[in-house]
């Protein structure tokens, strides 16, 4: 497959900026039809033009966010053998995207990736802080919210805050969606047993055996149930 040609910064600067071009057309239109814009349909057209301009700008910012997110993660993935040397730079890049583009999907996803990378490198406080911000940002997306909640469970468990970890795993386990439910139940079974709640532990494991027979945790659950007997 032919290698995709890399567009240089110089070439990018030569290309017309979509938002500026559109805004210029809007202004020229307004000047040419200013009398009509004061009345009736003209005013409606002007409103439509404004909304269109905002939409173009939003798309432009969204694309910027995803481009920067992709560059940061590509750099990390391509240099895994030397990741200890560049992880701080990648985390900084992700944090910058998350803060600068916080209202856009690219920025929100950068926040999740930043939290993940913080967790992977043992910075659990930073991971939790950013998972919580991401949870608020994705409150209308149930699937991503469940992923963030279960990630919070792992992060709090890593800090040995088992009570809070259990809270987040319970939220995932009690969700009407099946996504990640068996994983949450398995982690609950472990943590209930670890905190002396043997009956709850058995209930969580039995739930997997009864309702999630195809779970990847099924063999581990069977072993855990035997140890509780």
Image (cartoon, grey):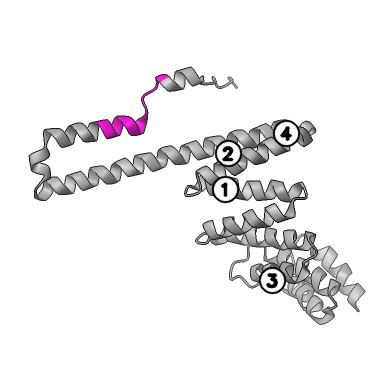
Q: Which residues are magenta?
A: 14-24
Residue sitting at 57 percent across and 41 percent down? 96
Q: Is residue 198 above or below residue 159?
A: below
- Indicate left or right for 43 with 162 as reference: left
Between the residue at mark 3 and the residue at mark 2, the CA separation in whole angstroms equals 31 Å
Residue bearing the label numbered 3: 167
For residue 109, the mark is 1
Identify the secondary structure beneath mark 4.
Answer: helix
* Residue 64 located within the stretch drawn in magenta: no
Identify the secondary structure beneath mark 2.
Answer: helix
Identify the secondary structure beneath mark 1.
Answer: helix
Locate residue 87, reporting x and y percent: 72, 38
Residue bearing the label numbered 4: 86
* Residue 185 occupies quadrant: bottom right
Kindly indicate whether the residue at mark 2 contacts the one at mark 1 (C-beta within 8 angstroms). Answer: yes
Mark 3 Cα shell of 10 Å, populated few (<14), some (14-19), many (≥20): some
Between the residue at mark 3 and the residue at mark 4, the CA separation in whole angstroms equals 34 Å
**Front residue (pair 145, 211):** 145
Locate residue 201, reporting x and y percent: 80, 76
For residue 40, the mark is none
Locate residue 209, reporting x and y percent: 77, 72
Identify the main secondary structure in magenta: helix
The earlier-in-sequence mark between 3 and 4 is 4
């Amino acid at each position: 497959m032919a290698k995709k040609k890399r567009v240089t910064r110089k070439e990018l600067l030569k290309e017309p900026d979509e938002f500026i071009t559109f805004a210029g057309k809007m202004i020229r239109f307004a000047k040419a039809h200013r009398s009509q814009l004061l009345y009736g349909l003209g005013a409606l057209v002007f409103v439509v033009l404004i909304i269109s301009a905002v939409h173009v700008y939003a798309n432009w910012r969204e694309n910027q966010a995803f481009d920067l997110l992709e560059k940061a993660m590509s750099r990390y993935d391509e240099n895994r053998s030397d990741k200890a040397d560049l992880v701080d730079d990648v985390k900084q890049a992700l944090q910058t995207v998350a803060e600068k583009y916080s209202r856009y999907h690219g920025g929100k996803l950068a926040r999740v990736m930043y939290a993940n990378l913080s967790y992977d490198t043992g910075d659990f406080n930073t991971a939790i802080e950013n998972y919580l911000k991401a949870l608020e940002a994705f409150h209308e997306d149930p699937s991503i919210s469940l992923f963030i909640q279960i990630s919070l469970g792992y992060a709090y468990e890593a800090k040995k805050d088992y009570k809070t970890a259990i809270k987040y795993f319970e939220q995932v386990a009690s969700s009407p969606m099946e996504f990640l439910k068996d994983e949450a139940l398995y982690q609950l079974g472990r943590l209930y047993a670890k905190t002396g709640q043997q009956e709850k532990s058995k209930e969580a494991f039995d739930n997997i055996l009864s309702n999630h027979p195809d779970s990847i945790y099924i063999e581990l659950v069977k072993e855990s149930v035997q140890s509780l007997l």
